[in-house]
Amino acid sequence: MANQNHQSQPSRVTSLGSSNRDSPISALTAYDYPTARILDENGIDLILVGDSLGMVVLGHSDTTSVTIDMMIHHTSACRPAINNAALVADLPYNSYETPEQAIASSRSLVNAGADGIKLEGGFSMIPQITAIIESGIPVIGHIGFLPQNIKSEGRYKKKGKSSDEYKRILRDAITLERAGVVAIVLESIVSDLAKEITETLKIPTIGIGSGNHCNGQIRVIHDITGNFPWFTPPFAKPHCNIANEISCAVKKYIQSI
Ligand code: KIV
């Protein structure tokens, strides 16, 4: 039976940082009921309704056209599927320009069933992060390569290669921890920097494309299941090939009619 209890559970997010964990934090994205239910039933710690849904579900070229209404829609699809994992939703591009807007957007995701939110950015996002946390909503930070900045960045790149950038990202991590985030996603930074951040902070780091030294790892579900065969990031290892399975079933179906 599906879980009909739609209550948000902020403690599931805050407990990710508990120091008595004996295994790395496992995190994957989900955007719909069946996927979220399969992840939850298999013991994943954290389910992220990522704004990557713009790319892997809606076929956009980047995440910048994802709206808060889309995030609400997909978060509410995942909520009833989850009994144990923490459910976190991304604040999409342009939905947290001011502290007031950040609180309103975060509340709408919590009302849709999220236990907490994630947002992209370091030092410059502290007013928004502080406001959201003070409103009682747990926040996961996200630094390093920021997909919502893809238009100004031009392309996906590894961050922290230059000494200035390395120091800036390390400072961002420390500042975010002081502001009270529960955990920090480190996206596409050099592995030495991810290691130093992980050793410096008390809160957990969750890596993606940042090496093996983080306290946990997160991936887009389509990347580890081979469900977006047209592009797989170099750091994502597919553990099965769903696209092939679907192709096979479709061919068999066509032949069967
Ligand atoms: O939107 C997303 O999928 C993310 C990644 C870190 C997994 O933010």
Image (cartoon, rainbow, N blue to C red):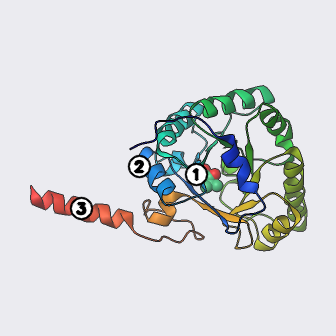
Mark 1 or mark 2, earlier in chain: 2
Q: Amino acid at mark 1?
A: Ala
User: Residue 146 placed where, x, y %?
Assistant: 71, 52
Query: Does residue 20 show up?
Result: yes
Q: Quadrant of residue 114?
A: top right
What is the CA distance from the residue labelled 3 to the residue labelled 1? Answer: 31 Å
Residue, disc 3: 249
Asked whether, in this view, residue 136 is left or right of residue 252, the answer is right
Residue, disc 2: 34
User: Residue 108 placed where, x, y %?
Assistant: 62, 29
Q: Amino acid at mark 2?
A: Pro
Query: Does residue 143 show up?
Result: no
Residue 145: give its label: none
Mark 1 and ligand 1: say if the CB distance to the nearest ligand atom is below 8 Å: no
Q: What secondary structure is marked by label 1?
A: loop
Q: Measuring 70% from the left and 26% from the top, which residue is drawn there?
A: 104
Residue, disc 1: 85
What is the CA distance from the residue labelled 1 to the residue labelled 2? Answer: 14 Å
Q: Depth check: 145 or 23 in front?
A: 23
Q: Depth check: 203 or 232 in front?
A: 203
